[in-house]
């Protein structure tokens, strides 16, 4: 499924990149369509629902092949596991909670790519700008303000 609820012909999208359309690639794209910002482990659990024998190494190989041809975007936010999403080319950015790792899409405030221009391009023609806003989500802030009794040790 896509954002608009239409069914996407993943095999055609895969073949259009020059890759062979395999069950693993189709299942991975279908999983990412419903699970944006997924880690490889989350993808593995999702893809195993239709392909129970798939391994984590296969997931890494499949995802990398899809990243290489531009169907999937790899997101890396510091030391946590990389996350993946379908590449929509809609120039959106991300907000990221440093505490729980939650990631959400946010639109570019200027609309079209690139929405920001660097002071120096070093001779490059800039076509996109990736922005990540890092912070702490309200759920994590609430938890920090009100720690639960079970999480603290009381010494006598």
Image (cartoon, rainbow, N blue to C red):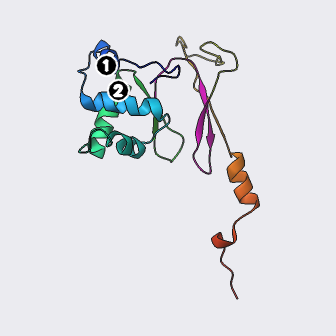
- 2 or 1: tag closer to the N-terminus: 1
Q: Position of residue 58 (x, y in %)?
A: 27, 40
Q: Residues within 10 Å of mark 1 (few under 14, many from 20)?
A: some
Q: Nearer the viewer, mark 2 or mark 1?
A: 1
User: Disc 2 vs disc 1: Cβ atoms closer than 8 Å?
Assistant: yes
Q: Nearer the viewer, residue 139 or 7?
A: 7
The quadrant of the picture occupied by the C terminus is: bottom right
The quadrant of the picture occupied by the N terminus is: top left
Residue stretch in magenta: 85-105
Q: Where is mark 2, residue-wise?
A: 66
110 drawn magenta: no
Q: Residues within 10 Å of mark 2 (few under 14, many from 20)?
A: many
The residue shown at (33%, 42%) is 49
State the mark number for residue 14.
Answer: 1
| Residue 150 in view here | yes
Indicate left or right for 129 with 156 as reference: left
The residue shown at (25%, 22%) is 21
Against 36, is 2 above or below?
above
Q: Position of residue 92 (x, y in %)?
A: 59, 23
Q: Position of residue 89 (x, y in %)?
A: 51, 17
Marks 2 and 1 sit apart, C-alpha to C-alpha, by: 8 Å
């Amino acid at each position: 499924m896509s954002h608009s609820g239409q069914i996407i012909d993943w095999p055609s999208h895969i073949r259009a990149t020059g890759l062979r359309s395999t069950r693993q690639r189709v299942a991975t794209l279908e999983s990412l369509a419903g699970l944006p910002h997924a880690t490889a482990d989350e993808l593995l659990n999702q893809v195993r629902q239709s392909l129970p024998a798939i391994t984590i190494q296969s997931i890494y190989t499949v995802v990398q092949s899809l990243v290489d041809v531009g169907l999937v975007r790899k997101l890396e936010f510091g030391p946590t596991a990389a996350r993946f999403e379908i590449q929509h080319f809609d120039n959106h950015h991300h907000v990221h909670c440093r505490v729980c790792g939650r990631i959400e899409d946010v639109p570019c405030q200027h609309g079209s790519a690139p929405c920001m221009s660097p002071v120096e391009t070093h001779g490059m023609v800039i076509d996109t700008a990736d922005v990540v806003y890092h912070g702490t989500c309200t759920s994590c802030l609430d938890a920090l303000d009100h720690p639960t009794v079970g999480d603290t040790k009381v010494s006598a």
